[in-house]
């Protein structure tokens, strides 16, 4: 296997769940991985002792030009910290401003072109003929989407080139222009992404872009010497006692189906669901305390009608209650599961968390991190996209935190990385 030169790797994502999702792919190699949430514009020095540092720009819903500026600043910050290679995380169906953020990163790195591979075949996301597909249904014209959000030239690497040879990949786009080019690559199978990862390594590309799918393949090439044997003994986070708190702050239909399963009679007293009123979240705190007296899995779900958007104020109130409850329980909690990027971010902000240490992956697209500082330091946090997984994704994640099965047991479900108002 070809190997890249060792050194710090920088990852930039446009939301928190995407940052953790992608960071987990590097953690799978044994690398020491952290997600930084300082939100101070880069005034605080980045932490030492990690092989991979991930920054989130929270730029999914802003203008492409602003998203590009934030991404460029994040890449610049990572460069100053010593990073030589960069992975720009984009949504697997190209939501947000993918062209703008990739273009901003390319300008900061001074590279003439960027390989862009948003496919995540393991989760039903593929790219064929330049079209992004979800479960074999074409949903986005990838070339047009990149063109909408960037001024760079847009090229295409077809599937036949990827399955032909490295030379075919290299010449597929042709000579585009003297400006930065974004090269959208088809991928239908994991093997296609592996080939692209080999190509990126063989040509020593310092900057690539994609979803967690490509990150999963490129991580072994970039982190071949990053494994830290000392981390094998770092299992305190997995040996905690107590129940699991599931926090549902999104109205995404898929998460609501998962919530409905937990709310039914299937699991009996093992699961207790407490609905949180957005206008009076603190009223739920006594009910949540009581629920933990009888049930190992407690769900705190924001009670917002399907046709009503979830506001920042509602998430802030929900997060305040969650942090208060978890702080009371201290070490008597196996972990938190947060659904939706905005939900996870609100909890971290309420707890003043500035650093997440990525430790494992529950199932593809559902990482587990440990909050390293703030009011909930030491507590594991599983982050799940609002649109991820089948109906059993939440209960499976809760059982995993309780030690019921390992992360090789369930790799079912599919991810919709930003299919709800929470983003990824």
Image: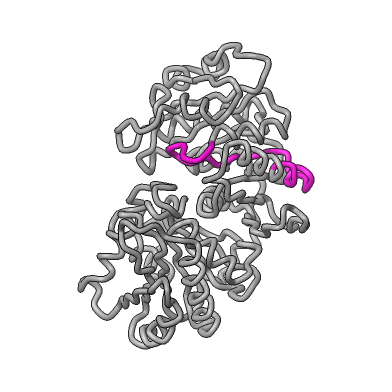
Q: Nearer the viewer, residue 282 or 134?
A: 282
Q: Nearer the viewer, residue 32 or 119?
A: 119
Residue at 62% across / 36% down in the picture? 65
Answer yes or no: is residue 280 visible: yes
Residue 113 percent across, percent down from the top left: 63, 24
Is 87 covered by the magenta stretch?
Answer: yes
Q: Nearer the viewer, residue 199 or 297?
A: 297
Residue 245 percent across, percent down from the top left: 42, 73
Residue at 59% across / 72% down in the picture? 351
Give residue 176's quadrant in the image. Answer: top right
Residue 216 percent across, percent down from the top left: 51, 43
Residue at 50% across / 40% down in the picture? 96
Q: Is residue 153 above or below residue 392?
A: above
Looking at the image, residue 392 sits to the left or right of residue 122; the answer is: left
Report the magenta residues as a range: 75-97
Is 51 covered by the magenta stretch?
Answer: no
Answer yes or no: is residue 28 visible: no
Of all residues, the one furthest to the left in this rendering is 265
Residue at 61% across / 23% down in the picture? 152
Q: Nearer the viewer, residue 147 or 120?
A: 147
* Quadrant of the frame with the N terminus: top right
Q: Is residue 121 above or below residue 236?
A: above
Q: Is residue 234 above or below residue 100?
A: below
Q: How is the image coloured?
A: one colour
Residue 330 percent across, percent down from the top left: 55, 82
Instruction: Give the total of numbered labels.
Output: 0
């Amino acid at each position: 296997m070809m190997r890249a030169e060792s050194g710090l790797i920088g990852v930039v994502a446009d939301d928190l769940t995407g940052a953790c999702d992608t960071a987990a792919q590097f953690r799978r190699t044994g690398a020491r991985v952290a997600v930084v949430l300082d939100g101070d514009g880069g005034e605080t020095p980045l932490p030492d002792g990690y092989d991979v540092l991930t920054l989130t720009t929270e730029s999914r819903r802003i203008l492409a030009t602003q998203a590009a500026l934030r991404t460029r600043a994040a890449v610049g910050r990572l460069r100053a910290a010593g990073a030589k290679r960069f992975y720009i995380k984009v949504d697997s169906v190209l939501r947000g401003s993918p062209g703008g953020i990739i273009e901003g990163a390319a300008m900061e790195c001074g590279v003439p072109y960027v390989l862009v591979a948003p496919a995540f075949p393991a989760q039903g996301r593929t790219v064929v003929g330049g079209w992004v597909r979800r479960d074999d249904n074409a949903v986005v014209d990838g070339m047009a989407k990149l063109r909408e959000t960037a001024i760079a030239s847009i090229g295409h690497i077809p599937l036949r080139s990827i399955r032909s040879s490295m030379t075919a990949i290299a010449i597929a786009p042709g000579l585009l222009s003297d400006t930065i080019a974004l090269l959208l690559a088809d991928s239908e199978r994991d093997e296609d992404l592996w080939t692209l990862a080999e190509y990126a390594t063989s040509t020593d590309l310092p900057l690539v872009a994609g979803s967690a799918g490509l990150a999963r393949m490129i991580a072994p090439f970039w982190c071949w010497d990053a494994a830290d044997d000392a981390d094998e003994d770092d299992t305190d986070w997995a040996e905690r006692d107590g129940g699991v708190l599931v926090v549902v702050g999104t109205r995404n239909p898929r998460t609501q189906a998962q919530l409905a399963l937990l709310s039914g009679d299937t699991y009996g007293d093992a699961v207790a669901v407490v609905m949180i009123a957005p206008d009076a979240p603190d009223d739920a705190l006594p009910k949540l305390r009581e629920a933990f007296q009888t049930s190992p899995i407690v769900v705190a779900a924001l009670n917002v009608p399907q046709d009503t958007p979830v506001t920042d104020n509602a998430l802030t109130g929900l997060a305040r209650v969650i942090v208060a409850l978890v702080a009371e329980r201290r070490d008597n909690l196996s972990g938190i599961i947060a659904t939706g990027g905005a939900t996870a971010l609100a909890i971290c902000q309420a707890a003043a968390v500035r650093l997440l240490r990525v430790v494992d992956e529950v199932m593809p697209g559902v990482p587990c991190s440990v909050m390293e500082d703030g009011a909930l330091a030491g507590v594991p946090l599983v982050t799940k996209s609002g649109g991820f997984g089948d109906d059993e994704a939440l209960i499976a994640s809760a059982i995993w935190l309780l030690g019921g099965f390992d992360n090789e047991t369930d790799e079912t479900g599919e991810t919709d990385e930003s299919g709800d108002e929470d983003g990824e």
